[in-house]
Amino acid sequence: MTFSVSAQQVVYFKGVVFKKNSPVTIAFASVTNLSRKNIPEVLSDNVGSFRIQAAIGDTLLFKKTEYTPQIVVIQSYSPLSVYMQAVIHLEQVTIKEVSKQKELNDALDNYKKKGQYYTLDPSVLSVLISPLSGLYELFGKAPAQARKFQQYSKQEMERIEVAKRYNKTVVKKITNMPDEDLEDFMFNFTPNVEDIRAWTDYDIISYVKRSYAYFKANRNSYKLQKLN
C-alpha cells in the first residue's frame, strides 16, 4: 500500500527528445500528459530537453511537425530518453499523364478510322443490325490489333499510376538498398494498381520494409538472369 501511494505521487520528470537512430535532439516538441488533463502541455527546449509533471504509470504524448507522434509510459523515476521517427515523404515521379493519355486515345482513334468500325468491344446485337461491319469488328485484322492496343494502353496507364507513388527513388529512400539490388527488387516486388489506389503512404512504407526484409533473406532466389 505504501508503494502504491508513492507510485502515484506527481513529481517533475525530466528527459530529452531525440531523432530516432540519431544523436540529434529535437527542439520544441510538444509533451502532453494524457493521464492528467489538468497538467499543461510543455515544449522541449532548443536542445531537446523537457520537464513535465507526471507520476509513475502516466502516459506521455510527444508530437512535432515532420515526426511521427510517440507515446511513452513512465515506468521509473530515471530521466527519459524519447526517440521520434522522422516522417518519410514519398516522392512522386513527374509524369505528363494527360499527354500520355491523349497519345493513347489518338492512337485508338486512328485504329477506328482505319477499320471503319465504331466500337472495340462489339456485341452480338451489332452483328445482327449491321452484319458486314459487325463481322469485320469481330474478326477483322485491324479490329484485333486495335483491341490489343487498347489492352496495352490500359496496362500502360496503370503502370504510370503505380510509378507515381512506387518507384526506385521511393524504394531507395525507404530502404537505402544497394543499387545492384534495386532492379531485382523492383522487378519482383512492385505492387499492382489496385493496391496502390487503396494504400496510404504508411502502407507503402510498411510494404517496402517487409518486402525488402524478405528479399534480403532470399536474395539468390530473386536475382534476374543477366543476358549476354
Image (cartoon, rainbow, N blue to C red):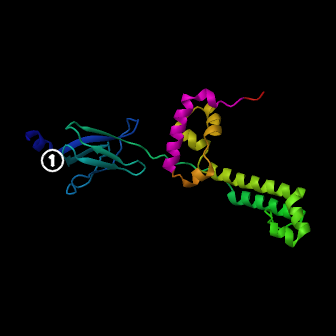
Of residues 180 and 129, the one drawn nearer to the viewer in this rendering: 129
Q: Residue furthest bottom?
A: 129
Q: Is residue 29 visible?
A: no
Where residue 55 appears, as percent x and y from the top left, is 18, 45
Of residues 62 and 213, the one drawn nearer to the viewer in this rendering: 213
Of residues 189 and 118, the one drawn nearer to the viewer in this rendering: 118
Report the quarter where the C terminus lies: top right
Task: Report how many numbered discs are placed on residues in the image.
Answer: 1
Name the residue carrying label 1.
Answer: 10
The secondary element bearing badge 1 is classed as loop
- Residue 91 lies in the magenta stretch: no
Quarter of the image holding residue 105? bottom right
Q: Image check: 126 left or right of 89?
A: right
Name the magenta segment's main secondary structure.
Answer: helix
Where residue 213 appears, as percent x and y from the top left, is 52, 34
Quarter of the image holding residue 38? bottom left
Q: Residue furthest left?
A: 2
| Image vertical order of residue 182 relative to residue 138, above or below | above
Q: Image check: 48 left or right of 2?
A: right
Q: Image check: 124 left or right of 192?
A: right
- Residue 219 lies in the magenta stretch: yes
Where residue 33 appears, as percent x and y from the top left, is 25, 51
Residues in magenta, as a range: 201-225
Quarter of the image holding residue 117? bottom right
Where residue 37 appears, as percent x and y from the top left, is 22, 57
Residue found 73% across the figure and 29% down from its top: 226
| Image vertical order of residue 97 relative to residue 174, above or below | below
Report the quarter where the N terminus lies: top left
Residue found 83% across the figure and 69% down from its top: 126
- Report the amino acid beneath label 1: Val
